[in-house]
Amino acid sequence: MDFIGANILSVGQFERADIDRVFQVADTMGPYARREKVTRVLEGAILGNMFLEPSTRTRLSFGAAFNLLGGTVRETVGITASAMAKGESLYDTARVLSGYSDVICMRHPQAGSVAEFAAASRVPVVNGGDGANEHPTQALLDLYTIRKELAGKGRTLDDFRIAMIGDLKHGRTVHSLCKLLCLFEKVHLTFVSPPELAMPAELVEQLRAVGHTVDVTDQLESSISHVDIVYSTRIQEERFASQEEANLYRGRFRLNREIFTRHAQPNTVIMHPLPRDSRAEANELDTDLNEHPSLAIFRQTDNGLLVRMALFAMLLGVEDKVDDYARPVTWQSRRTPI
C-alpha cells in the first residue's frame, strides 16, 4: 500500500505487510506521545476533524495525535453545527473542507458516508466510524494493543484465542477487528452474544474461510475460561429502533472481578473499545476491575495515540523525518508513562 495521500476508509485496504509497517512507525512515536520530546514535523499542516456523531476518545485522539506531530486541528462537531443542517451535500462539504485542510478525519452515522465524502475530497480522508460499518483506526489500535500484550508473554498475533462479547451485530469495532484478524494465522475466536445481536454471518464465514476456528455462543462464563483476550463491547443503543428494544439486552453479559477471577485465567487480557456503559442497568465491564493488572482498556487508548500519529506521518510522507524536527520538552508534569 502506498500510504502517501491515501484515504483510510476500511481495514480491507491493508495487507499484513502494511500492518507491520504501521506498527513499526507507531513504535517510534513513544517518546513524543510520552512528552519526552517534541517534534514540529507537521508544523503548518491542518487536520479537519469532522465528527457528525458523538465521540470523545476518537475525536480527541485524532486531534492530539496531529498536535503531537506539530500540526493544527480545526473541528466541526455534530450535524447541527455543520452546513449539512441546511441541506448541504457530502460532496459540497468535502470540496470545501478539503480546501481548508491537509487531512480530514470524519465520523458519520450512515454506513458508506465517509467513502462518499472521500470521493469528493482533495486531501486524504480517515474514517473515524461510519454507522455500524467500520472503524479502521480503532481496529488498528486494538490489534496493536493485542500484539503488545501478547508480546509480554512471548506470544505473537498468530495462534492466539480471543472472546468477543456483547453487541456484535452493531459493533463496528469488532467488525473491523475481525477483518484484520483474517490476515493472521490460527486465531481461535469465540463470539458471545444474544442470538439477535450475533456477529454478521458473512464475517463468521470469512474468518472460517481463512482457517480460523470460530465458536458462537450465548454463554459468558465458559467462553472466557481458556482465552488470551477478552474483548467486551457495550450495547450500541443508538443503532436500535427504540430505547426500549436496546434495554432488552443491556446488562446481559456483565464482566466483573468475581466472574473474571472465577472463570478466566489470571493473565487473560481485558479489552474494551470504550465508552463502557457504567450505568447500573448496563455495567458490561465493572469498575471493580479498574485496578486489575489485566485490564488493558486505558493501555488501548494510549496506544491509539501511537497508531494515529503513525498514520498521519505516513499519509503525509514524513515518518522518516519526525526525529529531524525534534527538540527537548521544556515543561514538567507528573505524567504516568504510556
Image (cartoon, rainbow, N blue to C red):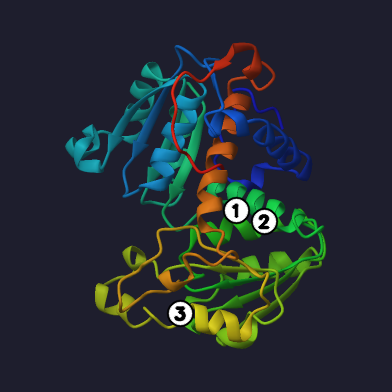
Q: Secondary structure at mark 1?
A: helix
Q: CA distance from mark 3 to mark 1?
A: 21 Å
The residue to which callout 2 is attached is 146
Q: Considering only order in the chain, which callout, 1 or 3, is on the residue closer to the N terminus?
A: 1
Which part of the image, by quadrant, shows the C terminus?
Answer: top right
The residue to which callout 3 is attached is 254
Residue 286 seen in this snapshot: no
Q: Secondary structure at mark 3?
A: loop
Does the residue at mark 2 contact the one at mark 1 (Cβ under 8 Å)? yes
Nearer to us in this view, 204 or 48: 48
Residue 12 seen in this snapshot: yes
Q: CA distance from mark 2 to mark 3?
A: 22 Å
Does the residue at mark 3 contact the one at mark 1 (Cβ under 8 Å)? no
Type of amino acid at the residue the image marks with label 3: Arg
The residue to which callout 1 is attached is 142
Whether residue 307 is situated above or below residue 186 in the rendered picture:
above
Question: Residue 305 at x, y = what percent?
Answer: 53, 39
